[in-house]
Image (tube, rainbow, N blue to C red):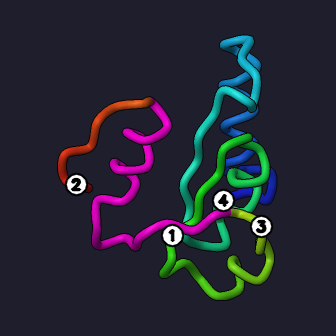
Amino acid sequence: MTSDVSKGRALRFVLDRLDADPAQCVAFGDNMNDIDLLETAEHSFMMNNANPDLIRRLPNVPRIGNNFEADVAHQLRRLLGMQDDSMS
């Protein structure tokens, strides 16, 4: 893979094509290849069991659950204002 390929660059490409703003984006990550994705999206979240280097690199990104739970789905429901019966 070339060095100019990244998740963040792909997100910026899609945002440009859709004429959308990063403020309209939510991103979730857990590893070092997610740095630019998490920095690009306005609403970024990191998994609690993310790579420790990623946690150190982006200490202000909120952390949620882990990869073995449904916390991404729970967070999306919260952001969309949907009731999440599994969290009651």
Mark closer to the observer (3, 1): 3
Tell me which numbered mark, 3 or 1, is placed earlier along the sequence. 1
Distance between the alpha carbons at the discs numbered 1 and 2: 21 Å
Mark 1–mark 4 CB contact (< 8 Å): no
Q: Which residue shows up at 37% across the image and 39% down it?
A: 77
Tell me which numbered mark, 1 or 4, is placed earlier along the sequence. 4
Location of the N terminus (image quadrant) = bottom right
Q: Which residue is mark 3?
A: 60
Q: Is residue 6 above or below residue 12?
A: below
Q: Which residue shows up at 36% across the image and 59% down it?
A: 71
Span of residues in magenta: 62-80
Q: Nearer the viewer, residue 17 or 27?
A: 27
Q: Which residue shows up at 28% across the image and 68% down it?
A: 69
Residue at disc 4, secondary structure: loop
Residue 57 position within the rendered picture, expressed as x and y whole percent measured from the top left: 80, 77
Residue 5 position within the rendered picture, expressed as x and y whole percent measured from the top left: 72, 50
Distance between the alpha carbons at the discs numbered 1 and 4: 25 Å
Mark closer to the observer (3, 4): 3
Outermost residue, bottom side:
52
User: Mark 2: which amino acid?
Assistant: Ser
Q: Which residue is mark 4?
A: 1
Quarter-wise, where is residue 31 in the image? bottom right
Going by the image, does 81 lie left or right of 5?
Answer: left
Q: What mark, if any, has residue 47 been given in the picture?
A: 1
User: Mark 4: which amino acid?
Assistant: Met
Outermost residue, front side:
88
Distance between the alpha carbons at the discs numbered 4 and 2: 44 Å
Residue at disc 2, secondary structure: loop
Mark closer to the observer (3, 2): 2
Magenta stretch encompasses residue 74: yes
Q: Which residue is mark 2?
A: 88
